Image (cartoon, grey):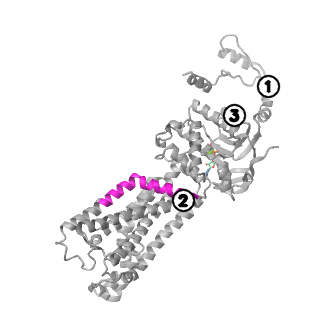
C-alpha cells in the first residue's frame, strides 16, 4: 500500500451558519494526480485553503504528510506548493525576481535558487521573458509562471486550484502536459481542482466529486463511471440513419410505445479538439 | 535568511524603488532647498525673528511669507506621506492575488504584516534622514553656520518624533488597507481621517467645550480654565496637535507650556531658552500619546489581519 499524503477527516467549515464544507473524508496517496471536481461554490477552494493552513476548519482535521495543517502550517507549506485560483505576481518585478522572492521565502540559498529558477523558466517556456516585468505578461504567461512558482520550491505535493481557467485550448494542453510530467518525472503528488471534466478525465488517476460541501463520489474514473453509468447503459439504443436525420424520423421513433427520449447525437470530435488540431498545424 | 528579513528587504526595495517615493522625495527636497536659499538671501530682514542662541534651528521653524516653515511642512504633509505609503499595503496584495502566493510559502501570516510595517518605518527614516542631512549640508555650505551640540540633539529628537508621527499615519493607512478591500476606499478614508484630525478636531473641541462649560462676559477665570481644559483634552486626541506641540517645544527652545496654562503662568513671556532635558519634560505626554496612537493602530491592524480570510472575495 502506498503512503497517504493528504488526509481529511470529517473536515467541516461553516461560513455564516452554512456548512460550506460538510464533514468530508479524503485520502490522496503518493504519486496520484487527484482530480477534485465540483461545480462553482461546491467548496473546493475552501478545502484547499484548509489543507494549507490558510483557513481554519470549524471542526474535523486535515493532515498533510502527517502534519496537522492547522497546527503546523509551516511544515506543510515547506513541502507543498500551491497555485491559487487567480494567481498573481508583483507586476513591477520580473518573472525571475518574482520566483526569487519565493525561493528566498523558502530559505533556498541564492546560488542554488538561481540555477533552479533558470531551469524552471525553461520548463514552463518563459526563458526569453525571464527579465520582463510580469505586468507585461498575458494571462496565459502568468499562469505558466504560476506553474513555475509551484515547481521552483521542489515540492512533494502540488495543489493546483483550477490551473487552466482563462487559458486558450493550446495553453490548456501545455499545462496539462506539464502537470503529467511533473508527476511522472519528479514524483510530485498532485491535487487538482477543476470543473472541466474533459481535462480531469485526461490526466487524473483518481477523482473526488464534491457537491454542496459533500463528497459524493471518490475513486478512479473507471470505478465511478461504472457505478454511475451502469443503469443508464442498459436502456440506451443507438440508431444510425441512411441519409439525413430529419425531424419526421425522430417524431416517428418517439411515437413508438416505451420510448422515453429521442436525442440527436453530436459528432465524436468535440469543438475543443478540433480547435487544438487547427492550432497545432500552424 | 528568515522569512521576516526576506519580506522586509523585498518591501523596502519596493518602497525605495517606487515612483511614489521618488515624487515625494523630490517635492520635499525642493521645498527644503528653497527655504534655505530664500532664507540665506533675506537673512537681514529676518534678523529680528532669529534667536541668537539657536541660529541653526531657525531654518526649520521660520516661515517666509508665502513659503511655510519646514516643521509646518512635516506636520501638514507628513500625514499624506504616511498615508501614501500605507493605504494599499494589504488590499493591493489581495486584489492582485499575490497574497495567497506569499502566504502559501513557509512563513507565518504575521511575518507579512510585520515586514511591511518595518519596511515602511525604514523608508520613512531614510527619507527624513536624507532630507535633514541635505538641509544641514546646505546651511553649512551656503551660510557657513555650524550647529552646536544642543541643536544637533534637538534635531535628532525631532527626527524621532517625525518618524513616529509619519509612522502613525502609515499605520493608519495600513489598518484601512486591511479593513477595506478597495484601495480607493482605504485612500479616501485615510485622507478623511487626516482632514478630521488636522482641521475638524479644533472646531469640534471648541463646540463641545462651549456646550459643557459655556462662557459669557462675567465668566470667572475658573470657568475659562475649565472651558480651555475641555477643549485641550479633546484636541489632544489629534496626532497633528500632539506633533505640532512636540516640534514647537523642540525647535523653539523657549517654549515651556501650551494652552491656557501658558497664558495663566505667563511663562511664555520670558523667552529664555530651555535646555533640551527641560523641553523634553514639557513634551513627554505628547510623545507618549503619539507613540500610543501608533501602537494602537499597529495592534488593531495585526489582530484584524490575523483573523481575516485570505481570499480576495
Ligand atoms: N469568506 C467567506 N465568507 C462566507 N462565505 C464564503 C467565504 N468564502 C467562501 N464562501 C462560500 O463558500 C462556498 C464555497 O466556496 P469555494 O470557493 O470553496 O467554492 P469552489 O468549489 O472553490 O467554487 P469555484 O469553482 O467557484 O472556485 C461558496 O458558496 C462561497 O460563497
Ligand atoms: Mg474555487
Residue B253 sits inside the magenta stretch: no
Q: Do pointers 3 and 1 mark residues of a single chain?
A: yes
On the image, the x and y values in percent for residue B197 come to 39, 68
Marked residue chain, label 2: B
Residue matched to label 1: A235
Picture quarter with the N terminus of chain B: bottom right
Residue A37 position, x and y percent, is 68, 40
Category of crowding for the residue at label 2, using alpha-carbon neighbours closer than 10 angstroms: few (below 14), some (14–19), many (at least 20): some
The residue marked by circle 3 belongs to what chain?
Answer: A
Give the left or right position of residue B311, taking residue A238 as reference: left
Q: Is residue A15 visible?
A: yes
**Chain for mark 1?**
A
Disc sitting over residue A203 in the figure:
3
Q: Which residues are magenta?
A: B1-29
Look at the numbered discs 3 and 1 and tell me whether their residues touch, using CB distance below 8 Å: no
Q: Is residue B55 above or below residue B184?
A: below
Asked if the residue under mark 2 is in contact with the one under mark 1, i.e. CB atoms within 8 Å, the reply is: no
Reply above or below: A74 against B295: above
Q: Is residue A42 rendered to the left or right of residue B214? A: right
Image point 22% across, 76% down: which residue?
Answer: B49
Amino acid at each position: 500500500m502506498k503512503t497517504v499524503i493528504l488526509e481529511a477527516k470529517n473536515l467541516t467549515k461553516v461560513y455564516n451558519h452554512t456548512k460550506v464544507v460538510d464533514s468530508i473524508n479524503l485520502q490522496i496517496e503518493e504519486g496520484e494526480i487527484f482530480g477534485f471536481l465540483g461545480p462553482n461554490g461546491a467548496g473546493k477552494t475552501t478545502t484547499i485553503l484548509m489543507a494549507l493552513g490558510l483557513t481554519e476548519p470549524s471542526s474535523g482535521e486535515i493532515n498533510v504528510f502527517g502534519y496537522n495543517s492547522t497546527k503546523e502550517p509551516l511544515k506543510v507549506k515547506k513541502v507543498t506548493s500551491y497555485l491559487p485560483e487567480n494567481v498573481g505576481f508583483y507586476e513591477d518585478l520580473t518573472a525571475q525576481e518574482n520566483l526569487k522572492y519565493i525561493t528566498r521565502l523558502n530559505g533556498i540559498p541564492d546560488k542554488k535558487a538561481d540555477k533552479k529558477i533558470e531551469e524552471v523558466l525553461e520548463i514552463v517556456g518563459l526563458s526569453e521573458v525571464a527579465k520582463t516585468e510580469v505586468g507585461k505578461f498575458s494571462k496565459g504567461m502568468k499562469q505558466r509562471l504560476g506553474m513555475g512558482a509551484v515547481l521552483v520550491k521542489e515540492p512533494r505535493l502540488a495543489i493546483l486550484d483550477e490551473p487552466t481557467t482563462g487559458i486558450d485550448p493550446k495553453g490548456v494542453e501545455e499545462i496539462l502536459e506539464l502537470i503529467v510530467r511533473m508527476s511522472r518525472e519528479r514524483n510530485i503528488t498532485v491535487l487538482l481542482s477543476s470543473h472541466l471534466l474533459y481535462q480531469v478525465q485526461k490526466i487524473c488517476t483518481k477523482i473526488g466529486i464534491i457537491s454542496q460541501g459533500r463528497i459524493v463520489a471518490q475513486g478512479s474514473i473507471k470505478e465511478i463511471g461504472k457505478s454511475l453509468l451502469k443503469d443508464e447503459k442498459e436502456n440506451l439504443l443507438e440508431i444510425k440513419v441512411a441519409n439525413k436525420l430529419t425531424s419526421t424520423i425522430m417524431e416517428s421513433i418517439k411515437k413508438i410505445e416505451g420510448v422515453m427520449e429521442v436525442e440527436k447525437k453530436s459528432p465524436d470530435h468535440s469543438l475543443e479538439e478540433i480547435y487544438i488540431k487547427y492550432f497545432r498545424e500552424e | 535568511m528568515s522569512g521576516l528579513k526576506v519580506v522586509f528587504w523585498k518591501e523596502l526595495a519596493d518602497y525605495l524603488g517606487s515612483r511614489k517615493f521618488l515624487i515625494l522625495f523630490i517635492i520635499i527636497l525642493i521645498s527644503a532647498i528653497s527655504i534655505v536659499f530664500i532664507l540665506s538671501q533675506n537673512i537681514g530682514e529676518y534678523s529680528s525673528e532669529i534667536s541668537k542662541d539657536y541660529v541653526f534651528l531657525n531654518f526649520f521653524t521660520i516661515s517666509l511669507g508665502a513659503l511655510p516653515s519646514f516643521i509646518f511642512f512635516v506636520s501638514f504633509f507628513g500625514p499624506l506621506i504616511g498615508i501614501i505609503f500605507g493605504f494599499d499595503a494589504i488590499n493591493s496584495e489581495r486584489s492582485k492575488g499575490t497574497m495567497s502566493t506569499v502566504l502559501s510559502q513557509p512563513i507565518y501570516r504575521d511575518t507579512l504584516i510585520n515586514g511591511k510595517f518595518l519596511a515602511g518605518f525604514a523608508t520613512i527614516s531614510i527619507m527624513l534622514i536624507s532630507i535633514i542631512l541635505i538641509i544641514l549640508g546646505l546651511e553649512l555650505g551656503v551660510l557657513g553656520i555650524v550647529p552646536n551640540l544642543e541643536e544637533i540633539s534637538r534635531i535628532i529628537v525631532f527626527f524621532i518624533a517625525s518618524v513616529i508621527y509619519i509612522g502613525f499615519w502609515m499605520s493608519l493607512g495600513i489598518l484601512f488597507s486591511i479593513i477595506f478591500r478597495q484601495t480607493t476606499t482605504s485612500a479616501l478614508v485615510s485622507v478623511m481621517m487626516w482632514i478630521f484630525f488636522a482641521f475638524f478636531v479644533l472646531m469640534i473641541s471648541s463646540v463641545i467645550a462651549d456646550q459643557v462649560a459655556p462662557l459669557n462676559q462675567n465668566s470667572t477665570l475658573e470657568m475659562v480654565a475649565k472651558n480651555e481644559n475641555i477643549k485641550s483634552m479633546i484636541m489632544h486626541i489629534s496626532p497633528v496637535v500632539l506633533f505640532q506641540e512636540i516640534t514647537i517645544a523642540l525647535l523653539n527652545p523657549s517654549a515651556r507650556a501650551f494652552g491656557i496654562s501658558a497664558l495663566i503662568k505667563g511663562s511664555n513671556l520670558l523667552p529664555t531658552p530651555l535646555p533640551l532635558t527641560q523641553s523634553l519634560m514639557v513634551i513627554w505626554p505628547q510623545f507618549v500619546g503619539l507613540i500610543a496612537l501608533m501602537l494602537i493602530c499597529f495592534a488593531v491592524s495585526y489582530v484584524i489581519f490575523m483573523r481575516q480570510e485570505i481570499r480576495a472575495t
